Amino acid sequence: MDINTSSRTGSLPASGTQRVGAQVLAFVAMAAALLATIVIACSLGPVSISFSKSLAILGSQLGLPSRVPYSEQEVLIVSTMRLPRVAAGALVGAALGISGAAMQGLFRNPLVEPGYVGVSSGAAAGAVCALFFGWKAWGAWTLPLSAFAGAAAAVLLILAVWRIRGGTSIASLLLLGIGINALLSSLINIMVASSSSEQELRSIVFWLQGGLEARTWEHVRLVALPVILGSLLMLSCGRDLNAMLLGDEQAASSGVNLAKTRYFLLLLASAMTGSAVAISGMIGFVGLVVPHAVRLAIGPDHRSLLPASALGGAIFLVWADLASRMILQPVTVQVGVVCALAGAPLFIVMILRSSQEGMGT
């Protein structure tokens, strides 16, 4: 299923000015929605804090004055317990959203997400190895570092095999990713079946389901640089992705270095996704559903689609995490489970909608 676009590379659609105005309005609305989401997520929990107090506390973290009174306990809850979790969720969601949009454009297929090239399964294999072999006892950062190393190893292996085979067919790259995912999933299942203790098994299952519990500012600092820097670098590829939507021949004639751009985007998306899942565990559907929904709303132009997908991914995952800790209080549902429960029906609805629109044209 190819993504169709009527705009030429680097040019605006026929109603250019009106389109740009609508996109600016959409960005402002999404930025406001993200801010509201952060305030709401910092307010709700076992100890409820009013929205005005949460907003004042968040403003105080930025050095902004406020006349709203709040207690030291409320500051501790918001700034130390909830805000790091919310910030980590927003960064992970942004990384998955923008990486998913880039991968869908690269493969010219809206059903692709970063996990299809082995990133998620590689991270899962690395993390499960750390839990299974007891590496986690070496330090708190062994688990996320093992996950990132597994993601990097899986992607580099796929790219190496793809390059040996010529490195030109996107379809073969996708098939290689599917094969590596199946292999790594089998290895993970073997380690799960061979777990020596119930605690070890619970730790593995807990990580595979994805979660943001007990995330601190250290986790935020670990993921912030690769996500922010990677997003900025990815935004510079918007015009090239637009050209690649038109086909390889059209992109090459427009001056796009196909091989260089593909390797750059694949490595960049893999690094961002690997960094994200290294602190959150396996979280699906964000990189699949969010770019697809944003594309239906604002169009296929990657110059606007990429940043909008980052904002949408951040909003989606923060709301999913809020739902995970509020739905069954005091029991916490894993955020990966909530993303699947919300993402799967949404994706089915969007597929049916796009199919009906296609039949009506």
Image (cartoon, helix red, strand yellow):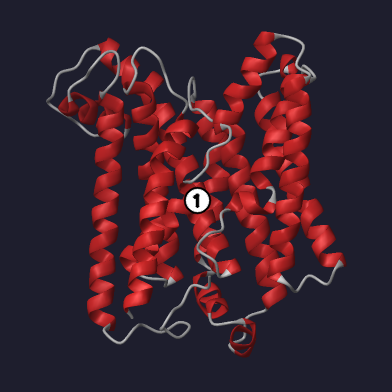
Left or right: 32 as drawn, with respect to 303: left
Left or right: 174 as drawn, with respect to 291: right
Q: Quadrant of the C terminus?
A: bottom left
Neighbor class of circle 1 (other Cα within 10 Å; few <14, some 14-19, many 20+) is many
Quarter occupied by residue 153: top right
Residue, x 44% and y 35% (percent of image)? 89
Residue nearest the observer in this picture, 178 or 91: 178
Give the secondary structure at mark 1: helix
Residue 63 visible in the current orientation = no
Badge count: 1
Left or right: 237 as drawn, with respect to 313: right
Looking at the picture, which amino acid does disc 1 mark? Gly
Q: Position of residue 208 (x, y in %)?
A: 60, 30
Residue 161 visible in the current orientation = yes
Residue 40 position (above or below residue 303): above
Quarter occupied by residue 140: top right
Residue 294 position (above or below residue 171): above
Residue nearest the observer in this picture, 177 or 34: 177
Residue with the most extreme left position: 67
Q: Position of residue 36 (x, y in %)?
A: 24, 39
Residue, x 72% and y 21% (percent of image)? 131
Residue with the most extreme right position: 164
Residue that numbered label 1 is attached to = 287
Residue, x 50% and y 28% (percent of image)? 211
Residue, x 72% and y 60% (percent of image)? 175
Residue 264 position (above or below residue 319): below
Q: Position of residue 342 (x, y in %)?
A: 38, 40
